[in-house]
Amino acid sequence: MRARQLCASTHCCVRTVESIVPRKVDFTAVYVSTRLAVGWSVEKIMTSSFRLNVLAAGIVLLAGVHDASAQIENQLDFTTSFAFTVGNTTVPAGRYTITPVEDDPWVLELKGGRTSVLIETLSATPEEVPSKDEIVFQRYGDQYVLKNIWTEGSGTGYVTETAVREEHISRHHGGAPSESRVAAHKRAKKPAKV
């Protein structure tokens, strides 16, 4: 190690200790020099490098399109005849609307009656592409937990993140959960009041 003293014009001195660190490797230079060593022309190297960059950009673009396809465009309405848990909140049976939050497409808002709950979700892939919009609940005994949201024709959907309440329900109502599906209906978002 070597010490160096830096002095600023204000006569304030700062003492730093630098360790000897190996130089960073410039992978672009390594790539070009190895290609030149095996007889590639500069033009061939540039073409190869350009193709790799286009391929990488295409993969990133497709990944973004894939995730965007799962997003709920407007609103999904559904009705349940049973109370259910979403996150750490249990809500009564009734009519509900699921709407995406504008800032984050993976956070959804569940509204119904006097209830408003934010739902944190992750991307999910269905076993087969859904032929209709539906909400999937996991049933533990007489308790229901909102688990998946599928939109018609989409290869991706939503899965709710497991919350403490869901873990509690699964422990106390034992056994493997069964699945209950409820039809949902798309509805255009109401325009904002001016």
Image (cartoon, rainbow, N blue to C red):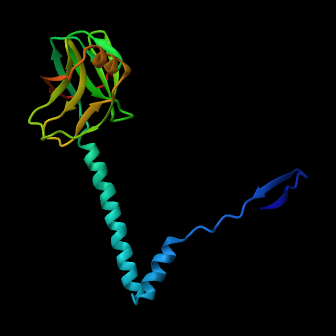
Q: Residue furthest front?
A: 175
Task: Classify 137 as above or below 28.
Answer: above
Which quadrant would the N terminus be assigned to in this image? bottom right
The x and y percentages for residue 21 are 67, 64
Identify which residue, 77 or 63, lies in the foreground.
63
Q: Is residue 48 left or right of residue 144?
A: right
* Residue found at x 27% / y 43%: 68
* Residue found at x 37% / y 67%: 53
* Residue found at x 26% / y 37%: 71
The x and y percentages for residue 192 are 31, 25
Q: Quadrant of residue 57?
A: bottom left
Residue 96 visible (yes or no): yes
Q: Quadrant of residue 150?
A: top left
The x and y percentages for residue 129 are 13, 41
Q: Is residue 103 left or right of residue 92?
A: right
Residue 189 visible (yes or no): no
The x and y percentages for residue 152 are 13, 36
Q: Quadrant of residue 19?
A: bottom right
Q: Residue furthest left?
A: 131
